[in-house]
């Protein structure tokens, strides 16, 4: 007994049961609770339980974000992903409209009704050219030009002016310009056709930030409206396009532009008339002009001499000109552009040695000469380019009449030549290259020599079995 009492009084007593032991021993009532809870929560008979615990997957998490924060997120996405994002919901559609800055209008009613400004409130670049055309929407005939594309009906005549008869009236265009000026006060670039002076004045008064303007089918009277746009820096005037529409911009219009837009940096004249006086006025008034593009001009003889008044001109481009200047005058009256760096001739018809000689004389300070697909450029004409002593880059493409002898006679006289590009000039042959010309090629920084497309094709087909006679493939039986 004493031993039992000592054992009972010893400090090694049995531990009290833990909560886990109680849980495992008494599982019967807990099982009832555990199994009944999910049954009650999944039961469709209790609507209160469904409202208390909603499905988290159906909650739109973007509702917690403000419009400004969501706009910043959407603006960081790639441009190709923005259009699909606008289909998510109406809110995203409206926010996506705020990110659009440039738009080409195809439906004029969309502009006049005011839906344009509700859908896209922050537009800065608007193109109204295609919207001003009255063309059938369900026609399968598409007229494509480098300036415009439009659908046409089947009953058109080949002698008609396509766009001239299918344009909105001037009053309707002016009404649309007034709506645009009121809805887009931050407008910076505008493309329009068949507008009047009053319509452009409205844009000039309401949109003080307009910097770029492209006018189609304009004339001298219309150009009075853009004189009020004091901040214009880029202007493109398209007066006449053969087969599409016709209009006239003369020295009067060029003088109006020169006196009203003195901050011009880039000017393009397409299908415009004029003469020495108009070009001279632009050079004297637009002191910041750096780039001048003349496309398919209708100017009088002697206009080349007016380029010498453009003292800060850096780039001169002549595009699709049927003639340069048939009577440029004496060399002492021509002058030259002291700051000119680039001369580009593209798809021009070089018919007269006198005009080509005068052109290179005016551009004698040029550093880059690019001639592409110009008809009539032969050895005699190209020799006049030797007067340009500072040329560093020469690019010739599609000059089929120029030979290796004519090219060598000019480029060997250029001591600063660093880059030479000759592409698709079929009369320039590798077999005619002299040792002096080969030495020059070895010291150039860039040489792209592909004068003959046939030889290039033949070298690329070596080992393929193609380009040979058919006897290899069609054997006699």
Image (cartoon, helix red, strand yellow):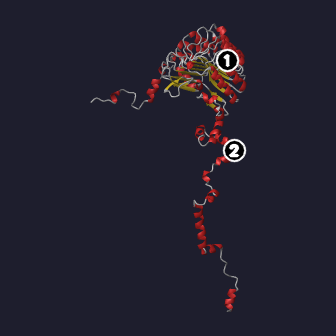
Q: Position of residue 352 (x, y in %)?
A: 55, 10
| CB within 8 Å, label 1 to label 2 | no
Q: Position of residue 80 (x, y in %)?
A: 58, 38
Give whichever of 152, 344 is nearer the camera. Answer: 152
* Mark before the other along the chain sequence, 1 or 2: 2
Badge number at residue 400: none
Label 1, label 2: how many angstroms apart (C-alpha)? 46 Å
Q: Is residue 307 left or right of residue 450?
A: right
Q: Position of residue 7 (x, y in %)?
A: 68, 87
- Tell me where residue 231 sits by quadrant: top right
| Mark 2 residue element | loop
| Mark 1 residue element | helix
Could you classify mark 2 by the number of other residues whose Cα lies within 10 Å: few (under 14), some (14-19), or many (20 or more)? few
Give whichever of 194, 319 is nearer the camera. Answer: 194
Give whichever of 22, 266 is nearer the camera. Answer: 22
Badge number at residue 66: 2
> The N terminus lies in which quarter of the figure?
bottom right
Tell me, yes or no, if residue 423 can be seen here: yes
Give whichever of 299, 289 is nearer the camera. Answer: 299
- Tell me where residue 247 sits by quadrant: top right
What residue sits right under mark 1 in the picture? 223
């Amino acid at each position: 007994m004493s031993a039992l009492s000592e054992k009972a009084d010893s400090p090694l007593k049995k531990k009290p049961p833990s909560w886990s032991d109680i849980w495992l021993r008494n599982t019967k009532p807990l099982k009832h609770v555990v199994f009944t809870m999910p049954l009650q929560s999944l039961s469709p008979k209790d609507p209160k339980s469904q409202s208390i615990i909603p499905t988290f997957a159906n909650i739109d998490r973007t509702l917690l974000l403000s419009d400004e924060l969501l706009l910043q997120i959407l603006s960081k996405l790639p441009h190709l992903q923005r259009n699909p994002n606008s289909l998510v919901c109406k809110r995203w559609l409206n926010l996506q409209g705020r990110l659009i800055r440039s738009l080409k209008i195809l439906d004029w009613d969309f502009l006049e009704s005011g839906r344009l400004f509700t859908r896209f409130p922050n537009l800065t670049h608007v193109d109204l050219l295609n919207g001003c055309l009255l063309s059938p929407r369900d026609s399968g005939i598409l007229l494509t030009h480098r300036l415009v594309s439009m659908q046409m009906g089947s009953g058109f005549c080949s002698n008609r002016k396509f766009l001239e008869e299918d344009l909105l009236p001037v009053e309707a265009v002016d009404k649309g310009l007034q709506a645009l000026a009121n809805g887009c006060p931050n407008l910076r670039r505008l493309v329009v056709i068949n507008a009047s002076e009053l319509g452009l004045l409205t844009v000039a008064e309401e949109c003080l930030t307009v910097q770029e303007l492209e006018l189609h089918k304009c004339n001298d009277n219309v150009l009075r409206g853009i004189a009020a746009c004091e901040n214009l820096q880029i202007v493109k005037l398209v007066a006449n396009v053969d087969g599409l529409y016709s209009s006239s911009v003369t020295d009067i219009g060029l003088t109006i532009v020169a006196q009203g837009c003195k901050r011009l940096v880039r000017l393009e004249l397409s299908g415009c008339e004029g003469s020495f006086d108009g070009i001279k006025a632009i050079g004297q008034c637009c002191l910041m002009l750096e780039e001048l593009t003349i496309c398919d001009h209708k100017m009088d003889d002697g206009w080349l001499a007016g380029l010498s008044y453009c003292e800060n001109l850096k780039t001169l481009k002549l595009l699709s000109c049927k003639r340069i200047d048939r009577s440029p005058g004496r060399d002492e009256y021509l002058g030259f552009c002291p700051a000119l760096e680039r001369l580009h001739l593209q798809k021009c018809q070089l018919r007269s040695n006198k005009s080509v000689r005068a052109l290179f004389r005016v551009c004698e300070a040029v550093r880059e000469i690019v001639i592409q697909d110009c008809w009539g450029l032969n050895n005699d004409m190209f020799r006049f380019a030797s007067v340009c002593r500072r040329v560093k880059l020469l690019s010739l493409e599609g000059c089929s009449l120029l030979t290796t002898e004519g090219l060598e006679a000019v480029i060997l006289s250029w001591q600063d030549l660093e880059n030479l590009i000759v592409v698709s000039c079929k009369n320039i042959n590798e077999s005619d290259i002299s040792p002096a010309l080969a030495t020059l090629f070895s010291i150039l920084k860039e040489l792209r020599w592909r004068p003959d497309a046939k030889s290039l094709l033949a070298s690329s087909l070596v080992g393929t079995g193609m380009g040979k006679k058919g006897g290899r493939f069609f054997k006699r039986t």
